[in-house]
Image: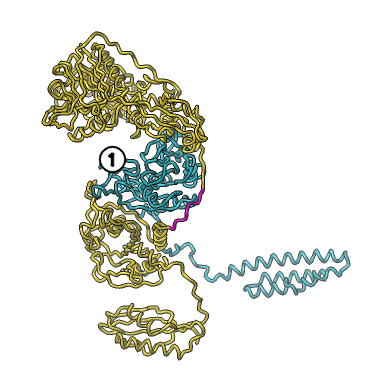
Amino acid sequence: MIERIDALRAEGARALSGAATSADLEAARVRYLGRKSELTQILRGLKDLEPNARAHAGARANEARGRLEALLAEAEARVLAGSAPDASRDVTLPGRRPPVGNRHIIQSVIQEIEEIFHGLGFSVAEGPDVEDERHNFGALNMPKGHPARAETDTFYLRPDVLLRTHTSSVQIRVMEKAQPPVRIICPGRAYRNEAVDATHFVEFHQIEGLYVDEGVSMGDLKGTLDRFFKEFFGPKTEIRFAPSFYPFVEPGAVVDVRCLFCSGKGCSVCGPLSGGWLEVLGAGMVHPNVFRAVGYDPHRWTGFAFGGGIERLVMLRHGVPDVRLFYENDIRFLRQF
Amino acid sequence: MKITWKWLEDWVELPDRPEDLAHLLAMRGLPVQSLERGTSFDPGIVVGSVVEVARHPDADRLSLCTVDIGSGRLSIVCGAPNVAAGQRVAVAQVGSRLPDGTKLRKTKIRGVESQGMICSERELGLSDESQGIWVLPGNPPVGAALASVVGSADPAIDVEITANRTDCMCVVGIAREVASARSAGLKPAPALRAEGTGALPEAKIENPADCPRYMARVVMGLKVGPSPDWLSRRLQAAGFRSINNVVDATNYVLREFGQPIHAFDAAKVGGNAIRVRRAKAGERLTLLDGREATLTPAHLVIADSKVPMALAGVMGGLPSGVTDATTAVVLESAQFDPGLTRATARSLGIASDAADRFAQGVDPEGVAAALDATARILAEVAGGKVARDRVDLWPGRAERPQITLSLQHLAQLLGVAVVKDKATQALRSLGIEATGPWKKQDGDEAASFRVPSHRLDLEIEEDLIEEVGRVIGYDAIPGRLRIVSTAYQPEEGSTPFVNRLADLARGFGFHEVLSPVLVGEIPPDARHGLQELEIWEIQNPKSRELKHLRVGLLPGLIGAAARNLHHGIREVRLAEVGKVFRASPPPLGSEHHEAALILSGKPDEWDHPGEEEDRYLELKGVVEALIWALGIDSFRTDAYHESCWKAGTGASIRASERRLGRFGEVAPSLASALGLNRPAWAAVLDVAALKGAVAGKRGYRPVARYPASKRDLAVIVPADTHHADLEAAIRAAGGAQLEEVRLFDVFEGGPVGAGKKSMAYALEFRAPDRTLSDPEVDGLMEAIVRTLQTKFGATLRGGSPAPRSGGAPS
């Protein structure tokens, strides 16, 4: 029996090593390793042998089987490689690419911001870019004579018609139509008649947020913006509130994030005196006069509002140095994002 | 607003480090914009005294100066026109380094050796530009290091003041905030020594509403002259020019207390009388700046017994003004009606610091302190004596408003509970005193607080709540995230649809751009037939290039395409989705979203081998695919002429009666007007129409179970026959079992013959319930051919229609 095992091993090794095609290989596999092969039969018959002979023959047969299996794997790899249809194909040639475009970075960031706030239960509201004084100023507690109403800042189309100077006008439009609770954000363009430089363009994008309900507090404002900025700038983002003034909120706040460039150690972006903070938004609790202007009862409802420039957020997060790049529409810029 | 460190320190104890002061003020809502850390000049830059100025022997515009620097005299060539003997100047000696790093060397200028440089403020890094050399203020010691006389001794602080905090537009106001934050008090003001009696004018206020408070003092025996160093240096740091000791003293008090002070030459106050009254029609006044103002009763003036001496709160008059010969002054400190001051200044076209301050409203209590401070400083810097008596008319004295604060509202609005003692203490630190104890009411507690006279911004309870918040610090408010579901509102806006459009365009290889809404002149070919009146025009435009609101996206895209091709980009595929504007109907006009695409240049030869020069059908294909992908199944194209398209290429796409958009090859005249000199193909789509044409969610249709029969059909038709008409006729004749009609070839010329073209279609017939037999399909094909023959005069090309090669087995 031992001789037969050795003979099968030698024959099988020859057949497997000599197989040139996958058909040869398969035939050899069936003959020497298949379920009905002689070697398999021997292994199955071991149980009928007396213990001593069983141990001896078993070891020999298993060894032969292991060797043939190894040879089979080698031969398979060899046959497979040899049977590649065209070994001369230059796989490094560039693929033929379909054209791929990009969303404008401002638009894709707006969409990202919308999605973050969708997750927090805000819906998106829209309003006209061409506004009247009431929606842009008067209802926002900016009476006649307020500096922001001076002609130097606002583009006028007619005596009472202007290009909105902020998206806060949409707050008024929404509250005029809907009763609380109101939980919206409104992204859009705003326009200011100011000198153009690396951080100012006459047109820019803002995002405005508004939540009016019973019992809304500045703590809600902080919690909401903290979550937003953690999603937008990263989970380690820290925010800070400091008092500030906007006519349509009271109390008012300026919202800073810990400098993204120096983690608050102080650098040229955040400046030597900021303590490592970068201003990103204006915010506060909706002024009772704003509620009165839209017919909400200021004794029943409270609310928070916030607003800020999208360009600034993009410039900070993506390191864009000049706001004018966003409007030059140079493909070499557009395709970077 | 600029002040200096030591000036602030006169009034309140400061933290040790500038950063700590900056943080303290920022957390009070007064962010520090800049804080000089003391300019450290090279010790080789010293104070020099110009001894002599002579003409350079070889250059008209240069002078040869002899400058005493204490340790010796230097000969310096100077090009500044303002250099003159007697000036104190900053001299950079040979070997010293300027703040920008330049090292001074001994040089010859036009053949004459220069042993140093007389510096301008710009060269010293003190200002962005300067005209001529910097003449040092005051009389600094010759030879002293410049660093010891300017800059570093007293750093300037620039604090940003929000529009509501006009009370902080002065040193004392900022000091109050620092004191509150450090739980300390203000330092006391130096006492005024008033002695003897002066010829105090007799004063009257005609109308208390115009002038609620008027005060005056007399300072006698003074000498008008230059200010001492400390005064001129502080003023310079605060942004004022030093003029003389009297003017400087008033400007100093303006910055210290926020109270404008006016000084009259006491000798020029006719009849020693002061009348605060409305001007009489036609009265005239020569102002300090030399302008002649003709007055009306709309203007408030300070007059003597006869004539106006000053425009109240706006600007003094020249005849009563202080001159070098003045020996006694009447100092005026007053409160004028803000609206009246603003209106007076505006109607006469005058801008002044005083008018700005009065228009904001001054602190009526502060009027007295500021007056006394001015008198005290004048006595010090001009050697005068202050008379004991003073004018104090206060007919418009008003009770300070009281505001009730509820503990519940406080906790609710801030989102943090504040105990009543802490609230009281916080407000007291700002001078806001409780007028009585906290009172219980309906489970709440409330107390009433009196607003101090300098806080004109505090009007309502929420204002007090902010004050408490400022004192306890916004950091003390814990964040809370409430995720609530508000009432369901169907999405009305265009945002999601706009995003889908831009995403689809991106998938077709188009880069999204953002063009400005503000545009210059709109080319006539891009006005879409709008009248001039329907185009918004900005009344106060920044420039001619930013004058109108865009009426369409096409010009912006053409311009962007031109710029990109100019930069060497080979192929330009751009898309924009944005608002376009019309000036009608009134009042706000109308705005709607447009989507536009442009295609120009050549694709990469590797990625797209064998592209045609004419990419009209490629652009059209993108538009069709985009519309289909949005969920619009059925639409058709018709020729449509507009001047923005090259003749014969314009087309409109409609779904039922809705016009979804237009496309074509951009008219070369329009393209070149916008800088594009290559063919470009573009489409303009109406977003609202697209949105309206989307049928809703697509329903299921059974997938075919039986094979289709495929036939080819090539017909020769007159060259002006339209594909759409042929296809419609084929479909009509083919009936319900004609599933697909696909054009696969158009051929003109050669064997087809002049005036004709060959159109080849692949047709697929299928029945939902069985395999169609050949005779059935043959019958349908015959019907189609007959129809084409009668309707279009079509002839079959290459004999009878044949089963399509490789078609379904029959």
Q: Quadrant of the N terminus of chain A?
A: bottom right
Q: For label 1, count other residues whose C-alpha is less than 10 Å away and answer few (under 14), some (14-19) or many (20+).
A: few
Looking at the image, which residue sits at the far bottom?
B775
Q: Residue at x 76, y 64 (%)?
A: A63
Q: Which residues are magenta?
A: B483-490
* Residue B441 is a magenta residue: no
- Residue type (three-letter) at the residue carrying disc 1: Lys
Q: Is residue B101 left or right of residue B300?
A: right
Residue ID for mark 1: A144
Task: Indicate the colour of chain A.
Answer: cyan
Q: Residue at x 50, y 51 (%)?
A: B485
* Residue B488 is a magenta residue: yes
Q: Position of residue B432 (x, y in %)?
A: 41, 26
Q: Give the letter of the yellow chain.
A: B
Question: Observer-nearest residue: B257 or A12?
Answer: B257
Question: Observer-nearest residue: B189 or B135?
Answer: B189
Q: Chain of mark 1?
A: A
Q: Position of residue B651 (x, y in %)?
A: 29, 70
